Image: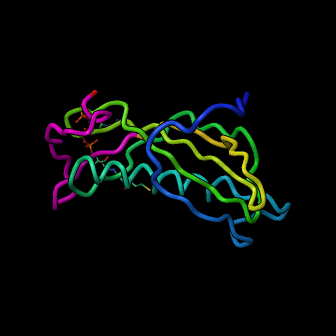
């Protein structure tokens, strides 16, 4: 399920530390916290590509592969895999590293769709970009 030699897919978008306030009663990190980080990472990449505000319109096939623990370094990587008229599909991966270790392990992946919005909150056309991943 998890290949320890694999590398994260996509550009680094966020790196953070999982804190005690992000944990469930069992002491593992909430899936909802991780989903929020992934949404932030995808939104960061989407906004940069669209050069406008963007909104999440769907999240598909989120998979929790491994748990995250308090104190882990959590890195979010995001890659735009499709650009439509106003929407973008963005693959996001979350990887954990123990504070005192070097091994990076993929813990979660998901596919997000973001829509570029105008000032009125309506979908706007995304202009052609120069970023390689955005030209697909
Ligand atoms: C984003 C929003 C403005 C889109 O409005 P809409 O009426 O669906 O707009 P459209 O039908 O013109 O669709 C716009 C694009 O989104 C895509 N889209 C719409 N619903 C989608 C869905 N469920 N899944 C994937 N793509 C979707 C369309 O295919 C279209 O893509 P394209 O322009 O690249 O062809 C509207 O759905 C919205 O405001 N949603 C709430 C967003 C939000 O608050 N997100 C945070 C939630 S916590």
Position above or below: 25 against 133: below
From the viewer's side, name the closer residue of 8 and 86.
8
Which quadrant of the rendered structure holds the C terminus?
top left
Residue at x 18%, y 42% (from the top left corner) = 126
Q: Which residue ends up furthest to the bottom in the rendered image?
A: 21
From the viewer's side, name the closer residue of 65 and 102.
102
Residue at x 21%, y 53% (from the top left corner) = 51
On the image, the x and y values in percent for residue 33 come to 62, 59
Position above or below: 125 against 22: above
Q: Quadrant of residue 112?
A: top left
From the viewer's side, name the closer residue of 64 and 5.
5
Which quadrant of the rendered structure holds the N terminus?
top right
Residue at x 64%, y 65% (from the top left corner) = 17
Q: Quadrant of residue 86?
A: top left
Residue at x 70%, y 52% (from the top left corner) = 97
Q: Is residue 72 magenta?
A: no
Principal secondary structure, stretch drawn in magenta: loop
- The answer to whether residue 82 is left or right of residue 91 is left
- The answer to whether residue 115 is left or right of residue 23 is left
- The answer to whether residue 25 is left or right of residue 45 is right
Q: How many numbered dots are placed on residues in this image?
A: 0
On the image, the x and y values in percent for residue 117 come to 22, 52
On the image, the x and y values in percent for residue 31 come to 67, 52
Q: Which residues are magenta?
A: 113-135
On the image, the x and y values in percent for residue 5 come to 68, 31
């Amino acid at each position: 399920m998890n290949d320890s030699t694999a590398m994260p897919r996509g550009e680094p978008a966020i790196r953070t530390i999982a804190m005690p306030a992000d944990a469930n009663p069992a002491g593992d990190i909430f899936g909802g916290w991780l989903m929020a980080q992934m949404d932030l990472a995808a939104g960061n990449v989407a906004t940069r590509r669209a050069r406008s505000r963007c909104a999440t319109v769907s999240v598909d096939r989120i998979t929790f592969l491994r748990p995250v623990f308090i104190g882990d370094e959590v890195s979010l990587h995001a890659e735009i895999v499709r650009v439509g008229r106003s929407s973008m599909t963005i693959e996001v991966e979350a990887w954990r590293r123990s504070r005192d270790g070097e091994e990076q392990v993929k813990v979660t992946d998901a596919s997000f769709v973001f829509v570029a919005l105008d000032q009125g909150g309506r979908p706007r056309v995304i202009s052609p970009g120069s970023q390689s991943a955005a030209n697909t």
